[in-house]
Amino acid sequence: MYFVEFNIILSSCLYFSDAFGLYGLGNGYRFFVRELNSTFGVFDSSPILTKWIRQPLDHFDQNETRAWHMRYFERLDYWKRKGPIYMFINGEGPASQWFLQTGILYELAKETKGAMYLGEHRYYGKSKPFKDFSTENLAYLSSRQALADFAKLIKAIKMSPKYNESKVVVVGGSYAGNLAAWMRLLYPNLVDAAIASSAPVLAKKDFYEYLENVSEDFEQHGTPGCFDKIKEVFSKYDELFKTSSGIEQLREEEQICESTDMDKPENKQLFFLDKTSEFMYEAQYGSPESIKGFCEDLKNTSQVFSAKDDDSDLWNEKNNCFDYDFDAMIENMRQVDWIMAWTYQTCTEFGYFPTTNSDEQPFTNNVFVDLFFSLCTKLYGHDFDEKRIDEGIERSNNMYGGLTPNVTQVVFVNGDLDPYHKLGVLEDVSYEAPAKIIPLSSHCRDLFSDKAKDPEELKEARKYIKYLIKRWIGAGEYKKPVKKP
Ligand SMILES: *[C@@H]1O[C@H](CO)[C@@H](O)[C@H](O)[C@H]1NC(C)=O
Ligand SMILES: *[C@@H]1O[C@H](CO)[C@@H](O)[C@H](O)[C@H]1NC(C)=O
Ligand SMILES: *[C@@H]1O[C@H](CO)[C@@H](O)[C@H](O)[C@H]1NC(C)=O
Ligand SMILES: *[C@@H]1O[C@H](CO)[C@@H](O)[C@H](O)[C@H]1NC(C)=O
Ligand SMILES: *[C@@H]1O[C@H](CO)[C@@H](O)[C@H](O)[C@H]1NC(C)=O
Ligand SMILES: *[C@@H]1O[C@H](CO)[C@@H](O)[C@H](O)[C@H]1NC(C)=O
């Protein structure tokens, strides 16, 4: 089974893509850990306290009596009177202390004598209102409830007289980047400024643009002929599916289990999604160099190797084969709480389903949005159909304002390699809500630093982001970066 040991690392910015590819999850994780390992040999691990706050199950029912406990971390060793409060919003995964030990929030806190906090999102990590993630129990999982949790947490923290002159800054990446921006939208009196990193603020059902950008990444940064090679390999898969002898050949070459019925349309789609996801992870978490390496491998082998770790749910270790059975995958997903929770949020609020519904990509047209409707209904029940998905997406975009959220003092940061940026704010919403696109940068990359290896563009961007935050909260001495980004 996948991802049990995950609490060590950077949840949100990682989990996000993974739950979105739905399986074959091992790969995104590997890139990320590799990167983190090389990035943070040493980090500052002063005492961090773990605390809990009681939260109502439903913030919008005045008669609510049911409650649960939300976990949060606190680190105060850099805090000095009047210093700001920094709150990291942890997204769809277990809370990670990393964000209070390194990266942009840590640096800001150090430079402005701030208090550091990190809150865990309801239904993830140890902040679970229920043990059993049945559909009925998932009803209180939504971004709107989570925002109310964070508002209550920040209010409680600010009750302390020592913070009577402290500003509040929230930081988040990926889905939690959305939440950071939306905290400013819904609680402008509580939160003074926000960093929304790699935030796909626009909810969208058929997110075919994702693969278009994966494709562009490989075209621009792959080795010569890479794009054509991808096309060739996928066309071959497509061709093989047309005959039963072809399917047998595929079964052999791709180590597909004897028992998996590859004539079933959902299983075929799953095969293509799995093969495609290897490229998605490369685009989302990789770099121009890793994309080139991937191209070299592809050229040498003419095959796309699916992830085979024991954390890949499609690899059947017992029988030494890949099981592309959609229904079996659904049963595996049920075993993992955070996947049940995140997939629920995609089915009820955001979509973000990566289909092949575009000619501007080489992965053939074999992954349809219906596959994801089927996923939603099979996981949560018949009500969770296309109509409900549409309504949820519309509600999110109406409530939060899509690509033009009515906020100020929020900086929207995106990496241009990261395919998610197609649902992000790429143009300034206003002078006080600017967009920053970082060339050659991947998902959430601005949140972590590696002083030795980060490209200049990334360092400049980080300086700029910190400058904005300091200006917005009027913190100590802030200097405008010399080079205007
Ligand atoms: C990352 O570092 C940890 C601890 O040093 C190690 O166990 C792990 O194998 C490393 N992972 C990768 C992908 O390099
Ligand atoms: C809350 O309880 C009061 C009194 O029992 C009742 O009149 C009201 O309808 C309840 N409100 C909600 C939102 O359930
Ligand atoms: C905050 O508290 C300190 C110490 O009690 C006090 O001196 C100061 O005037 C307070 N500031 C505000 C804005 O209330
Ligand atoms: C997509 O990817 C390419 C190549 O990495 C990049 O230059 C481009 O800006 C991306 N974004 C869009 C919206 O096309
Ligand atoms: C690809 O094959 C060539 C020639 O066989 C070899 O020199 C090269 O190291 C291989 N590259 C990779 C990434 O395996
Ligand atoms: C945006 O928010 C401001 C208050 O923060 C409000 O006055 C204004 O009407 C809002 N604009 C829109 C288009 O909702």
Image: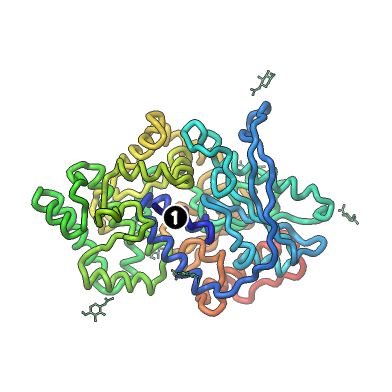
- Crowdedness near tag 1: few (<14), some (14–19) or many (≥20) residues, C-alpha within 10 Å: some
Q: Quadrant of ligand 3?
A: bottom right
- Where, quadrant-wise, is the C terminus in this rendering? bottom right
Relative to 381, 128 lies left or right: right
Residue visible at 39% across and 45% down? Answer: 333
Measuring from the top left, give residue 286's x and y in whole percent: 41, 67
Residue nearest the observer in this picture, 279 or 335: 335
Which quarter of the figure has residue 327? top left
Q: To which quarter of the image does residue 480 belong?
A: bottom right
Q: What element carries label 1?
A: loop
From the viewer's side, name the closer residue of 404 and 45. 45
- Relative to 461, say whether 192 is above or below: above
**Residue 427, how many percent across, how many down?**
52, 57
* Residue at 49%, 74% in the rendered image: 38
Image spot of residue 222 (x, y percent): 32, 71
Image height check: is 24 above or below 417?
above
| Residue underneath mark 1 | 3
Q: Position of residue 383 (x, y in %)?
A: 40, 29
- Residue type at mark 1 is Phe
6 to the left or right of 310: right
